Image: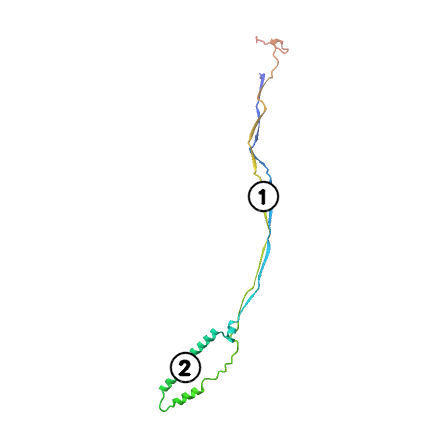
């Protein structure tokens, strides 16, 4: 015998929508200020410098009083040394003289001859000038212009948006009961297809 009732269940349907948390940035305003520092070109030139010292050169032509005194003192010392040397040499010759030698005429002859004649001829000035120099100098300094950028920005503002979860029920749960059998007749003999049951068999 086939079942007379068909039962069907309809499940619930839920739709879930999730919104994530995020930060919203409110754009601020900014100001820019530009300033300029001017550079420049600087050139410094120092020419060569020549130093000429002619003191010694002029002093050799026309000596100063101090130079004359120093030269005379040096000449006196030199003459004293030479006289001492001559006297020592003559004294030695006199001491070592022998009877057969005539030393005195020899000394007189050497004194008469004397030193070679000095005509005091010399080139003037005897000393040249002292020449020195300081090298020249050229200094070039160039500085470029400078640009200064000054940014002024307002404080940034952020807004926090919290997350959200939304549930939507798109279908309710349900139970469907359907009768699939034929009609029921009361009494059963009212069924047109009724066949009496033979109980004698």
Pointer 2: residues within 10 angstroms few (<14), some, or many (20+)? few
- Residue 2 visible somewhere in the drawing: no
Residue depicted at x 60% and y 41%: 30
Of the pair 115 and 160, the residue shown nearer to us: 115
- Residue 90 visible somewhere in the drawing: yes
Does residue 82 lie above or below 157 as drawn? below
Name the quadrant of the N terminus. top right
Horizontal and vertical percent position of residue 13: 58, 25
Give the foreground label among 1 and 2.
2
Tell me where residue 46 sits by quadrant.
Answer: bottom right
Horizontal and vertical percent position of residue 16: 57, 28
Pointer 1: residues within 10 angstroms few (<14), some, or many (20+)? few
* Residue ID for mark 2: 83
* Residue ID for mark 1: 151
Q: Residue furthest front?
A: 65
Tell me where residue 135 sits by quadrant.
Answer: bottom right
Q: According to the image, what is the colour scheme of the structure?
A: rainbow
Q: Earlier in the sequence, mark 1 or mark 2?
A: 2
Name the quadrant of the C terminus. top right
Q: Which mark is residue 192?
A: none
Horizontal and vertical percent position of residue 105: 40, 90
């Amino acid at each position: 015998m086939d079942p007379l009732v068909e039962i069907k269940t309809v499940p619930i349907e839920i739709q879930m929508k999730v919104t994530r948390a995020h930060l919203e940035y409110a754009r601020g305003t900014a100001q820019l200020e530009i300033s300029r520092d001017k550079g420049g070109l600087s050139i410094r030139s120092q020419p060569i410098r020549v130093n000429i010292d002619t003191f010694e050169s002029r002093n050799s032509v026309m000596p100063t009083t101090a130079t004359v005194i120093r030269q005379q003192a040096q000449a006196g010392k030199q003459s004293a040394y030479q006289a001492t040397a001559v006297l020592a040499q003559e004294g030695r010759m006199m001491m070592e003289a022998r009877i057969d030698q005539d030393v005195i005429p020899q000394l007189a002859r050497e004194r008469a001859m004397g030193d070679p004649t000095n005509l005091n001829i010399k080139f003037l000035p005897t000393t040249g000038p002292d020449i020195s120099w300081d090298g020249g100098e050229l200094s070039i300094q160039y500085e470029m212009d400078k640009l200064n950028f000054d940014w002024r920005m307002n404080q940034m503002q952020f807004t926090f948006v919290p997350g959200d979860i939304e549930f939507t029920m798109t279908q309710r749960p349900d139970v469907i009961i359907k009768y699939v059998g034929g009609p029921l007749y009361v009494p059963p003999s009212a069924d047109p297809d009724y066949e009496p049951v033979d109980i004698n068999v």
